[in-house]
Amino acid sequence: MGWIKVDAAAAIADGEYQLVTTEDDIELLVANVDGEFHAIENVCSHDGGSLEGGCIEDGEIVCPRHGARFCLRSGEVTAPPAYEDIDVYPVRILDGLVEVSDEPED
């Protein structure tokens, strides 16, 4: 497992996110939720579109197209029209930098 540097933890404000891409061309959304960082695959399981542009509400990302919601901690669907969960990725803070794993959690 490798780690991808995202940005300084202080550069990602609460309720905001940044996008990173793994070496396998998987786009990840790395979000700050109340000072905790979480990473999920940047894809809505409803239509395969990007979650980028969606807002963060109550620890969930809201799909900007159809309103499906996903828990940023677990990747679980919390509101339709999506019904399949999405992958989450381990995140760590090392020397003030946010890093995300290039492999999803089991």
Image (tube, rainbow, N blue to C red):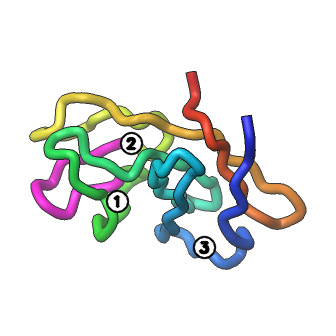
Q: Disc 3 marks which residue? A: 12
Corner quadrant of residue 53: bottom left
Mark-to-mark CA distance, 3 and 2: 18 Å
Residue 51, compared with residue 87, is above or below; it is below
The amino acid at mark 3 is: Ile
User: Residue 105: horizontal and vertical position, in percent?
Assistant: 58, 29
Q: Disc 1 marks which residue? A: 57
> Which residue is found at the position 30% from the left and 58% from the top?
51
Mark-to-mark CA distance, 3 and 1: 16 Å
Q: Are marks 1 and 2 in contact (CB under 8 Å)?
A: no
In what element is the residue under mark 3? loop
Residue stretch rendered in magenta on the structure:
61-70
Q: In this view, does 76 lie to the left or right of 26?
A: left
Corner quadrant of residue 67: bottom left
Mark 3 neighbour density, 10 Å: few (under 14) some (14–19) many (20 or more): some
Q: Does residue 103 belong to the magenta stretch? A: no
Residue 31, compared with residue 60, is above or below; it is below
User: Residue 47: horizontal and vertical position, in percent?
Assistant: 14, 45
The amino acid at mark 2 is: Cys
> Which residue is found at the position 61% from the left and 54% from the top?
37
Corner quadrant of residue 35: bottom right
Tell me the number on the disc at residue 71. 2
In what element is the residue under mark 1? strand
Give the quadrant of the C terminus. Answer: top right
The amino acid at mark 1 is: Glu
Q: Does residue 65 belong to the magenta stretch? A: yes
Q: Give the camera-side residue of 58 and 105.
A: 105
Mark-to-mark CA distance, 1 and 2: 10 Å
Return the disc, 1 or 2, that comes first in the chain's sequence.
1
User: Residue 4: horizontal and vertical position, in percent?
Assistant: 69, 54
